[in-house]
Structures are given as structure tokens and as C-alpha cells.
Image (cartoon, rainbow, N blue to C red):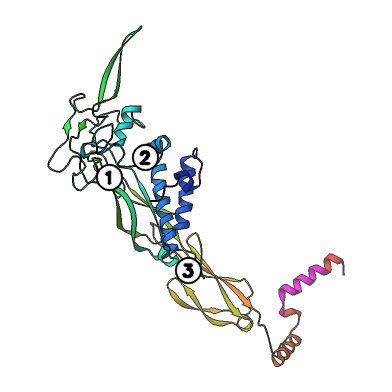
């Protein structure tokens, strides 16, 4: 098995990077290697998994602290477990690595400061999805694949082999913490720390579950169907409640955050909830006017170009834009006219153009006449 790369190296950040820097690096890497953008590319698929694995650890303050202290071993779910089933852990079988660190350092962020058996919410996880411009405009349903920690199906989170149960720690009475009395020059001072016998968990597992090695939890690849609302923007985040990592002690699961990537369109450009596009027309259509076919998100529509339409003139199709997210109504579509000058004319066509030019006067060209009037004033001609 290939040696795992350093998680900071995977995300391209330094060890002292802030949470915002880590999140920004993750989003950039996840978008770069997302399988939707590289179908069939196994290398990108593996890098995408590697990026997600790195972010899962570095975005979690507890896991990050363990990783910084012990490297990959510190976040290995098998670390410190399984002695009762033949493992060699000095901490005994069925020990959660969180409990080991709670006993050493009093827990991260006060996690074990209260009842060791109190329910605790699971952490959030992240995934991303790439959708088309039209799907963002009209809404769609997508199946999201991601990885999260779930409660072990064999032991149902107890960490004990099926048919057995963890026993309440006699040293702490199941609280996970013990009170220490210390004599000082100022009198007796009471302090609390994690119980050495159960390592802060409040229970002791004599026969650890073989499937999860006593941790009570497993990593699993999962899918969830997500409804993406009409009008969603590029890089917006959808929250899917209860689909994150499993909680502790029957606590609720965390949430799944889905980063939405919207592909660029070949014709349309989004500005707010309005849609813009360029419409090429011929010289004669601009001069004489014409009925043209305009593409919209709802299909093709007819529009009449008026006589004397100028290059870069803009006309509006009301209500043909993108639906307002979470509200009523839609934006508009703006169409910019691009007058295309013909190339590679034959001699007959050139002669016709010359005849046309000779038959017109300055009064037919308002902008040209205005320009030369200003030019005359500028040079006092």
C-alpha cells in the first residue's frame, strides 16, 4: 500500500494555516479534481478522494490536533482499539481515540467536561456537485456521493461485540471523570480529570466489536438525493440536515454541505438574475429590419429587429431570465445586437455596395455627422 501523503501537502497549505485558508484550499482542489469534470479519469478520482480525506481531518479541530501530534496514526480509527481481540494497544480493547486524548489533555474544546454518556451532535461533512447552466436556472435533482462516519451496524454504537454490553466504569460511576483532592498551602483544592480506568468514556468494553474494532463507528460511502432549487448560483452551498457524521451516544448526526459548481454556458451569461447574450445579425437586417429567432432558457422566440438598428444596441425580453431564488418572479433577458460585416465579397457584390454608398448622404449617418461636426469645432475648420 502506498504511503499516505501529508494532509497539509495534499491541500497545499502550511501547518499553521487558518480554518478559512484550509476551507478555501479544499474548495479549489475539490473543484479541480471533481469526477464530474474528469469522467473516467481514475487519477483525478483518487486525488479527489485524497483531498476529501485530508479536509475531513484538518477541518475538525479534534482530529487536526491528533494529526498534528501523531500524524496519520492519530486519526486511524483502529488506533488504540482491539486489544481484547488480540491487538497490542496499551490502552485496552474498545477504546475510542477521543477518550485517550481526553484522559491526557482533558478533552478538546471541553468535549468531555460534562457527562461522558451525554448525547453529542456529529460533525458536518462536505461534498460538491457540478450542474449545467440550465439546471441552475430551472432546478434539478442530483444524487450526491460522499463519505461519512456512521454508527456501526453490528454493535449499534456500543463498541461491544453483539450479544455483550459495555459495563459501567466502577472507578468513576459512569461519569467519565474523577475528582482529585490536592492539599495546598491555601487548603484542599478539588480538580477534575478524565477517568484513567475508562479513559473518559464512562463505560468499559471487555469484548470489542470485531466489525468496528470497538470504536462503535465506521466510515461508509453514501449517496443522497438532493433537490437543487431553481435560481441557485455558482459556489452556493446547500445544507442537507442529518446526513453528516453520526453523533456520539445517540446524539444527532451532523449535516452535509453540498458546494454547487455551475458550468459556463456557450451562449448565455448570468448577471444577477438576468441573462445576457449576443445576437449576430447581417448588415441588411440592421438597415432594413427583420424578424429574427432568439435563443432563451425556455426555447426559441421570435423578435422583430427595427430598421436602422445599430451595433451593440440592446433589447430586453421581459421575464425570460432566471427565477429569483426562494422568491417569486424571474429576471429578464438582454440581447446585445452584433452587426456582422460580410467578408470575401465578389466583384458584383462590391460594385453594389459602392452604388449603395454613392446613393447615401451624410444625413443618413447621424453619428458620423455628429463626429465630423465636433471635429470641425475642435480644429476651427
State the image coordinates of residue 86 (x, y, percent, origin top left): 23, 39
State the image coordinates of residue 31 (x, y, percent, origin top left): 46, 56
139 vs 159, left or right, is: right
Q: Residue visible at 74% across and 74% down? A: 368
Which disc, if any, is residue 246?
A: 1
Helix, strand or loop at disc 2?
helix
The single residue placed furthest to the top in the displayed view is: 185
Q: Residue visible at 42% across and 42% down? A: 58
**Is disc 1 in contact with disc 3, using a CB cutoff of under 8 Å?**
no
- Disc 1 crowd, CA 10 A, few/some/many (<14, 14-19, 20+): many
Which disc, if any, is residue 73?
A: 2
Circle 3 is placed at which residue position?
Answer: 318
- Disc 3 crowd, CA 10 A, few/some/many (<14, 14-19, 20+): few
* Quarter-of-image position of residue 191: top left
Q: Nearer the viewer, residue 95 or 309?
A: 95
Is residue 271 shown above or below 16? below
Give the main secondary structure of the magenta stretch: helix
Q: Nearer the viewer, mark 1 or mark 2?
A: 2
- Disc 2 crowd, CA 10 A, few/some/many (<14, 14-19, 20+): few
Is 230 in the magenta?
no
Quarter of the rendering occupied by the C terminus: bottom right
Amino acid at each position: 500500500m502506498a504511503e499516505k501523503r501529508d494532509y497539509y501537502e495534499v491541500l497545499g497549505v502550511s501547518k499553521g494555516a487558518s480554518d478559512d485558508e484550509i476551507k478555501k484550499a479544499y474548495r479549489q482542489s475539490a473543484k479541480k479534481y471533481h469526477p464530474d469534470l474528469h469522467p473516467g479519469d481514475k487519477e483525478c478520482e483518487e486525488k479527489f478522494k485524497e483531498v476529501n480525506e485530508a479536509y475531513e481531518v484538518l477541518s475538525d479541530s479534534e482530529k487536526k490536533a491528533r494529526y498534528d501530534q501523531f500524524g496519520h496514526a492519530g486519526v486511524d480509527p483502529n488506533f488504540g482499539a482491539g486489544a481484547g481481540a488480540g491487538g497490542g494497544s496499551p490502552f485496552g480493547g474498545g477504546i475510542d481515540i477521543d477518550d485517550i486524548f481526553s484522559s491526557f489533555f482533558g478533552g478538546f474544546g471541553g468535549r468531555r467536561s460534562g457527562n461522558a454518556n451525554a448525547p453529542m451532535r456529529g460533525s458536518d461533512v462536505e461534498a460538491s456537485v457540478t450542474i449545467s447552466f440550465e439546471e441552475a436556472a430551472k432546478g434539478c435533482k442530483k444524487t450526491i456521493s460522499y463519505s461519512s462516519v456512521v454508527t456501526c451496524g453490528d454493535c449499534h454504537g456500543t463498541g461491544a461485540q453483539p450479544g455483550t454490553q459495555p459495563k459501567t466504569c466502577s472507578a468513576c460511576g459512569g461519569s467519565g471523570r474523577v475528582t482529585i483532592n490536592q492539599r495546598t498551602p491555601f487548603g484542599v483544592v478539588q480538580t477534575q480529570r478524565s477517568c484513567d480506568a475508562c479513559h473518559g468514556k464512562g463505560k468499559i468494553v471487555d469484548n470489542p466489536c470485531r466489525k468496528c474494532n470497538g470504536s462503535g463507528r465506521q466510515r461508509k460511502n453514501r449517496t443522497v438525493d438532493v433537490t437543487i432549487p431553481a435560481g441557485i448560483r455558482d459556489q452556493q452551498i446547500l445544507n442537507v440536515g442529518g446526513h453528516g457524521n453520526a453523533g456520539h451516544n445517540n446524539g444527532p448526526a451532523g449535516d452535509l454541505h453540498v458546494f454547487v459548481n455551475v458550468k459556463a454556458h456557450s451562449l448565455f451569461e448570468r448577471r444577477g438574475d438576468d441573462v445576457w447574450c449576443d445576437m449576430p445579425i447581417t448588415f441588411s437586417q440592421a438597415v432594413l429590419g427583420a424578424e429574427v429567432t432568439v435563443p432563451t432558457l425556455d426555447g426559441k422566440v421570435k423578435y422583430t429587429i427595427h430598421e436602422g438598428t445599430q451595433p451593440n444596441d440592446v433589447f430586453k425580453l421581459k421575464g425570460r431570465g432566471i427565477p429569483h431564488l426562494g422568491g417569486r418572479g424571474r429576471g429578464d433577458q438582454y440581447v446585445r445586437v452584433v452587426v456582422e460585416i460580410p467578408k470575401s465579397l465578389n466583384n458584383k457584390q462590391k460594385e453594389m455596395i459602392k452604388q449603395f454608398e454613392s446613393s447615401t448622404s451624410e444625413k443618413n449617418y447621424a453619428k458620423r455627422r455628429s463626429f465630423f461636426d465636433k471635429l470641425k469645432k475642435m480644429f476651427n475648420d
